[in-house]
Amino acid sequence: MTTLLHPAPPLAGGFASQASPPPLAAPTAPTAPTAPLVRWFAEIGRADIASVGGKGANLGEMTRAGLPVPEGFVVTTAAYARFMVANQLDDRVDDALAALDVDDTTALQAASESIRSQIRAGEIPADVRAALLAAYERLGEVTTGPSPVVAARSSGTAEDTADASFAGMFESFLNVRGEEALLARVRDCWASGFTPRILFYRAKRKLPARMAVAVVVQRMIAATKSGVIFTADPALHEPRHVVIEAAWGLGEVVVGGLVTPDHYVLDKTSWRVIARRIARKEFLLQRDEATGATVRVDLDDDPRALQPVLTDGELAILLDLAKRIETLYDSPQDIEFAIGDGRTMLVQTRPITTLEHAAAAPPPPEGGVLVRGLGASPGTASGSVRVLVSPADGASLREGEILVAPRTSPDWVPLMRRAAAIVTDSGGMTSHASIVSRELGIPCIVGTAQGTTRLASGMMVTVDATAGVVRAGVARPTPSAAAPVRGIPSLAAAPPVTGTRVYVNLGEPERAEEISRLAVDGVGLLRAEFMLVSALEHRHPRLLLREGKGDEVVSRLVEKLRIFARAFAPRPVIYRAMDFRSNEVRGLEGGDTIEAREDNPMIGYRGCFRYTKEPDLFALELRALKEVRAELPNVHLMIPFVRTASELRGCKRLVDESGLTADPRFELWIMAEVPSVVYWLDSYASMGIAGVSIGTNDLTQLVLGVDRDSEIVAQLYDERDGAVLDAVRAIVEKARRLGLRCSICGQAPSVHPEYAELLVRWGIDSISVNPDALARTRANVAAAERRLLLEGARSARGRAGR
């Protein structure tokens, strides 16, 4: 359902009934300095980037255009230069960076901390101090009174430009009040130009080692709601749409990915609200008037948690502002806004730089929608349908066809590789089809309920997994002369440095070399099932053992394991042993006569218990691991679905007998998928396990009692449910107390960015995600770590002040 916003006459010339704040200009002076130490927004624009940085220049440009920007000024790069010279810091910085290898994490951290410590300890020259405090005093006179509450925000000279965004790398400080606090925050902003992430980014982008930093000082808005506007759809490269995301309170919760914001998509021409998704907002951030600190307010029992943040009137105002800003800059923009005291204010804009040039999306096919489901792996593909009910019928699937099936399991993987897209009747975001499709980069729709009945082999269709629909016909190809979306250049941003390791979930040997070249610390989950399906020749492993082909299976598994171990060496590769469920193994040749039928195989004969009952099959994997480790000792073993200490004790005996544990470098991990792990973790630790990796997929279904493969109850499956989070936290904290390493390899961190914040706060050692979520997760982890450091520093300063 779409909603039509009515752009009333006041919107055409401005922004509804709001009055633009008068530009705050510098007081008249007899003579102007050749290099001003402070400049007001009304004095500056895009031509002044060298003096006020990208953020400052954009705020000035918007102010001069009559857009609603909170009043403020910029401490210029001339002031920064005066500070560096007065404290003799330039030469010391050059010496520290001259021979720095930014790929050496330890050296990078040490150089960064040394430089930033010296900047924070430096004395601000008298003329810079006087200019800054005079401007701060005048800002109070024309706004809220003495000692106004402001934001101090770093503004780099290469920041927020079309060539480099540095988005999220420089530091900003909210709710700053008082002269001494402001002086300290300005020094902190200057120091933020030398964080490890920025030093790494500059080196990889071949930018100068030193870059002048200006500081924006801007009146704080007592925001009741905030968010971000994209004037082109960043997911679909659609220039006709405006995307708005909003949450309650200060905007840090949106730009930092701390909560899932409300999501709105609007059409620029018709003013229609095309899509409106209201999220559950768990908390907000706001200023504590008593202490001046930014505090968290939980919304557990607050009706706002589930209420829409923005009204249609506010959407109309934001759409009008977005169109005006895009016209002003003649390119798509990423805008931050805040709403408070009855006014909508703009606090930042920058060119959209995180997307590649893309031709306009192909128009949808002429046919109507045939089926709908959950878009589990985004993308669009057209082709001929091939309906299969079993992988045994896979010979009929041709390369590039659309695979339609009731569901998929590991023995479907070879077929899935050949498909252009996948559609299943059942499943949710963490079903097998979803997980594998995201890893392979194949568009996938799950939970259609009627895909195999409404689609027939030979039909020509288009799978739009982004929208979760299958349409009749083939999308018309986009003409080759189509122009790229204007102003959206490519940017290969350097990865931030994090203390929490970021691992990848893998199973496809063909992708090992490609993924190993990314910014990844190792493989946190190497799924045995994908490799074993090939090694077993799609036959039941018991059948092969009966035929005396055990050595052949081991040899094939060794070959595939070596691919991963070599690609990632010396980084760790955690191999999760085979976790076939009986219903999945029945699909292999011979499985129907070997496997018992279980009413609920998800919690049946699988994982650790199965190894103790069929040690000869488990021995094949142990032999392969031992052979690979003789050459490449970075491969370790993880046992899935551990229910009790007696199970693990029996399984551990088999591992010991294989000779693997005789090597002190070998690590035995367990998956934490069953809630009983919290009770038994002490016993597991006493058996000598090295670490525990949380599998949120099974843990969620067992905590909530929800079948994760059922589309009928899919709405109840939520890894963010309080009970699930409580279990995850208990596992992380208990593992830390026992001296065990703790990781997480379920789908939750890949799908929900806010998970990273929680996991870092609880003290997790590593997070393992799908390849497509690596960069996003590392950025979220870095942001969370930075917030923790800032909170620790503020707390320490508070204690020192007492």
Image: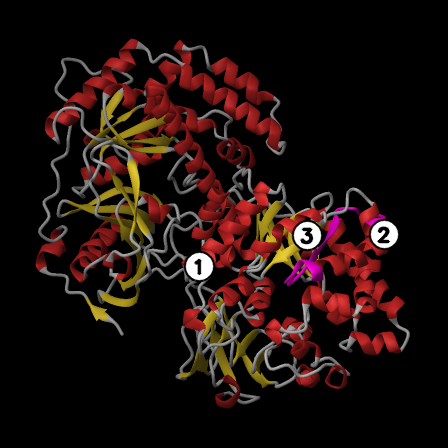
Placement of 347 over or under 371, stated as above or below: above
Front residue (pair 152, 597): 597
Question: Which amino acid is tagged 2?
Answer: Gly
Whether residue 100 is visible:
yes
Crowding at dot 3, Cα within 10 Å, few <14 / some 14-19 / many 20+, comes out as many
Whole-Å distance between the Cαs marked 3 and 2? 16 Å
Crowding at dot 1, Cα within 10 Å, few <14 / some 14-19 / many 20+, comes out as some
Does 284 sit left or right of 390 as displayed?
left
Front residue (pair 203, 556): 556
Part of the protein shown in magenta: 629-647
Placement of 482 over or under 133, stated as above or below: below
Query: Which of pointers 1 and 3 indicates the residue nearer the eye?
Result: 1
Whole-Å distance between the Cαs marked 2 and 1? 40 Å
Q: Which residue is mark 2?
A: 659
- Residue 100 falls within the magenta-colored stretch: no
Question: Which amino acid is tagged 1?
Answer: Ala
Q: Which residue is mark 3?
A: 669
Disc 3 and disc 2 in contact, CB within 8 angstroms: no
Dot 3: element: strand
Does 488 sit left or right of 280 as displayed?
right
- Residue 630 falls within the magenta-colored stretch: yes
Question: Which amino acid is tagged 3?
Answer: Trp
Which is more N-terminal, label 2 or label 3?
2
Front residue (pair 633, 644): 644
Q: Position of residue 326 (x, y in %)?
A: 28, 50
Front residue (pair 469, 250): 250
